[in-house]
Image (cartoon, grey):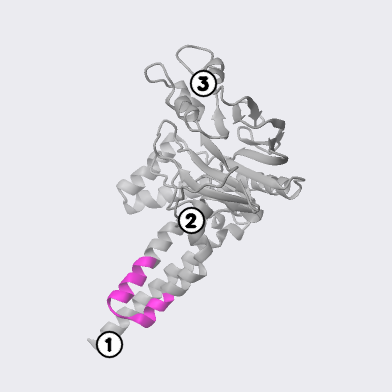
C-alpha cells in the first residue's frame, strides 16, 4: 500500500508538472508571432484554465501536507506573477482623486444596440449622457435618421455637453465607424490605415490644458465567429461529449488563429504610432477583441500601462454574450499618467460589451 501511495503521488506530481508547464507556456504565448505560430499564439485564451488547475493542485498538496510537492505549483505561480496580475489584478478604489484629473470612457455600443429604444429613449445614449466622462471613445458607432432608431440629431442633442466630436469611417469597406466625443478641443483626427475590411483605428490629438494628448480609438479585428460557431462553443460547455468537443475545438482554434494573425499587424501599427508619437501623453483605448494575455495586448502595452491592471480589480470581463468571459476592452496610458478606479461597468447590458472607464491624472 505504501508503494502504491508513492506511485499515485508521483503520477499526480507528473500531471501537476504538465499543467504548470502549460500555464507557463500560455502565460508567455504573447511573445510568439501569430504569423509564424498562429495556434500557439492563441494559448493565452486557456491561461485562466491552467491557472485554476494549478491552484487546485497547490490546494491539494497543502491539504495532504505534501509541502515539498506544493512548491511546484507555487514556483510556477511566481514565474507567472506578472501575467497573473495583468489578467486578474487586485486594487482598491479611492475617493481621493487628484485635482485636475479627468474621466475617460471606452464603449463598443453595437450601433446603440442596433438603435433599440425603451420608452422612446436609447439606454446607451442615456448612459453616455449621465456618465460624467470628459472623453467618450465609441466603437461600432452607427446612427439612422428615423424616429424608431437613434439619429445623429438626437445624439448631438443628448451629448451637448461635449462641444467637440469626430466620427470617422474605418476599414476598407467604409461601413464601420468609431467616434470620439470630448470636452477638450480635438486638434486633429486621422485614420491609422490597417489591412482590414471592417475594423480600424482612429488617432486624435486633444488639447489637455497646456499639453497635447495623442488618443487612439481602436476597434481591432473580430474573431469572425458566426452564430453557429458560438452555438458550438456553448454546446461544448453545456454538453461536453468527447467527439463534439474535439470537432468543436478544431473549428474554434482554426478561426481564432486566423483572427489572431489578422490582429497582429494592427497591433504592430499601433505600437509604431506610439513609438513615433511626438507628444508626452498617450492614451490607447477600445475594443481589442483579444484577451490581456495575447500578442495584441502585449504589443500595444509594451510602452504603456494597462489602466485596469494598475487600478482595477478582478477579471473585468467586458464581453457579455455567448459565455465568452474575457476582458477584451481596454484603456492603456503612457507611464507619465496615473490611473484611478478603472472599472468595467456592468450596470448596463444593452450592448454585447460592457463599457470600461477610469480617471486619469498627470504624474508630477
Image disc number at residue 3: 1
Q: Which residue is mark 2?
A: 87
Q: Which residue is mark 3?
A: 158
Residue 311 placed where, x, y %? 50, 52
Circle 2 or circle 1, nearest the eye: 2
Q: Secondary structure at mark 1?
A: helix
> For the view shown, which residue lies furthest in the bottom direction?
2
Pointer 2 local density, CA inside 10 Å: few below 14, some 14–19, many at least 20? many
Pointer 1 local density, CA inside 10 Å: few below 14, some 14–19, many at least 20? few
Query: As displayed, is residue 322 above or below residue 44?
Result: above
State the residue in front, 204 or 265.
Answer: 204
Circle 3 or circle 1, nearest the eye: 3
Q: Is residue 60 magenta?
A: yes
Task: Give the CA distance from mark 3 to mark 1.
Answer: 74 Å
Which range of residues does the magenta coloring cover? 55-72
Query: As displayed, is residue 112 above or below residue 293?
Result: above
Amino acid at each position: 500500500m505504501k508503494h502504491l501511495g508513492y506511485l499515485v503521488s508521483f503520477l499526480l506530481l507528473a500531471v501537476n508538472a504538465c499543467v504548470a508547464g502549460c500555464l507557463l507556456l500560455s502565460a508567455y504565448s504573447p511573445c510568439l508571432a501569430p504569423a509564424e505560430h498562429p495556434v500557439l499564439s492563441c494559448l493565452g485564451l486557456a491561461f485562466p484554465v491552467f491557472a485554476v488547475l494549478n491552484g487546485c493542485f497547490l490546494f491539494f498538496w497543502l491539504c495532504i501536507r505534501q509541502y515539498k510537492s506544493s512548491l511546484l505549483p507555487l514556483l510556477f505561480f511566481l514565474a507567472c506573477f506578472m501575467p497573473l496580475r495583468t489578467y486578474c489584478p487586485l486594487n482598491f478604489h479611492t475617493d481621493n482623486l487628484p485635482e485636475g484629473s479627468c474621466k475617460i470612457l471606452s464603449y463598443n455600443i453595437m450601433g446603440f444596440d442596433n438603435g433599440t429604444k425603451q420608452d422612446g429613449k436609447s439606454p446607451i445614449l442615456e448612459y453616455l449622457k449621465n456618465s460624467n466622462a470628459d472623453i467618450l471613445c465609441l466603437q461600432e458607432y452607427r446612427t439612422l435618421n428615423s424616429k424608431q432608431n437613434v439619429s445623429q440629431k438626437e445624439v448631438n442633442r443628448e451629448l451637448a455637453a461635449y462641444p467637440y466630436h469626430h466620427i470617422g469611417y474605418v476599414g476598407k469597406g467604409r461601413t464601420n465607424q468609431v467616434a470620439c466625443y470630448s470636452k477638450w478641443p480635438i486638434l486633429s483626427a486621422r485614420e491609422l490605415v490597417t489591412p482590414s475590411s471592417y475594423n480600424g483605428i482612429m488617432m486624435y490629438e486633444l488639447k489637455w490644458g497646456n499639453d497635447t494628448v495623442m488618443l487612439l480609438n481602436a476597434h481591432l479585428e473580430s474573431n469572425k465567429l458566426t452564430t453557429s460557431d458560438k452555438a458550438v462553443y456553448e454546446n461544448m460547455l453545456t454538453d461536453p461529449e468527447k467527439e463534439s468537443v474535439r470537432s468543436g475545438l478544431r473549428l474554434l482554434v482554426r478561426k481564432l488563429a486566423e483572427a489572431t494573425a489578422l490582429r497582429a499587424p494592427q497591433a504592430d501599427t499601433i505600437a509604431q504610432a506610439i513609438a513615433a508619437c511626438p507628444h508626452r501623453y498617450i492614451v490607447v483605448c477600445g475594443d481589442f477583441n483579444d484577451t490581456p494575455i495575447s500578442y495584441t495586448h502585449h504589443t500595444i502595452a509594451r510602452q504603456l500601462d494597462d489602466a485596469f491592471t494598475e487600478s482595477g480589480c478582478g477579471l473585468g470581463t467586458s464581453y457579455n454574450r455567448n459565455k465568452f468571459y474575457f476582458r477584451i476592452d481596454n484603456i492603456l496610458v503612457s507611464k507619465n499618467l496615473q490611473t484611478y478606479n478603472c472599472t468595467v461597468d456592468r450596470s448596463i447590458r444593452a450592448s454585447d460589451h460592457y463599457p470600461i472607464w477610469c480617471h486619469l491624472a498627470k504624474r508630477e
